[in-house]
Amino acid sequence: MNKNNELIQQMILYYAGDPKRIQHFLKVYEFAKLIGEAEQLDSQTQHILETAAIVHDIGIKNAEAKFGNCNGKLQEQEGPAPARELLSSLKYAPDAIDRVCYLVAHHHTYQNVNGSDYQILLEADFLVNLYEDGLDSSAASNARKNIFRTNTGITICKTMFGLSE
């Protein structure tokens, strides 16, 4: 079994009884995989992107337990430690773990985006959140203009939400 399939299974166990969170990370993973492949990322960057997409919201459980909410900044704060622990237990390479933890710690930070893996993770998470949160086309248009940078992400966002610009 490839590492990320094993990681997906571990994340399903991590979110046992919470189908909404399982559905969310799987959708973000699929959009990230699609966008990364279409944008022709190198294999290492693609692997890191996909791995980060799988664990990007791992901090939610700790944030809810500690603070009673799971806003984006708390997810970023609480996510890297359990992500590092899980990825280490599955024998991911230390440099990959470091980058994935960086992405987990920044996936709700929209300025100073450094790297195509970071950019695509933001886009994939936005595609899913816009839909799951039931936001209207003006919110999608605003996100398209302010967040999306890849040709593939822009095309998907415009197509999915029926945007003309």
Image (spheres, rainbow, N blue to C red):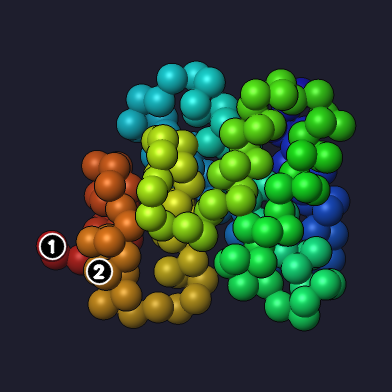
Residue 50: x and y, percent? 57, 36
Q: Which residue is disc 2 drawn over?
A: 141
Q: Quadrant of the N terminus?
A: top right
Mark 2 to mark 1: distance in Å?
A: 8 Å
**Relative to residue 129, is residue 10 depicted above or below?**
above
Residue visible at 41% across and 30% down? 37
Element class at badge 1: loop
Residue visible at 27% across and 70% down? 142
Q: Earlier in the sequence, mark 2 or mark 1?
A: 2
Viewed as shown, does residue 19 lie left or right of 118?
right
Residue 78: x and y, percent? 73, 58
**Relative to residue 151, is residue 59 depicted above or below?**
below
Q: Is residue 54 visible?
A: no
Whether the residues at callouts 2 and 1 have beta carbons within 8 Å, the answer is: yes
Looking at the rendered structure, which numbered label has been put on residue 156? none
Looking at the rendered structure, which numbered label has been put on residue 165? 1
Q: How many marks?
A: 2
Q: Residue furthest front?
A: 112
Element class at badge 2: helix
Residue 106: x and y, percent? 54, 52
Residue 94: x and y, percent? 72, 24
Name the residue type under label 2.
Ser
Q: Quadrant of the C terminus?
A: bottom left
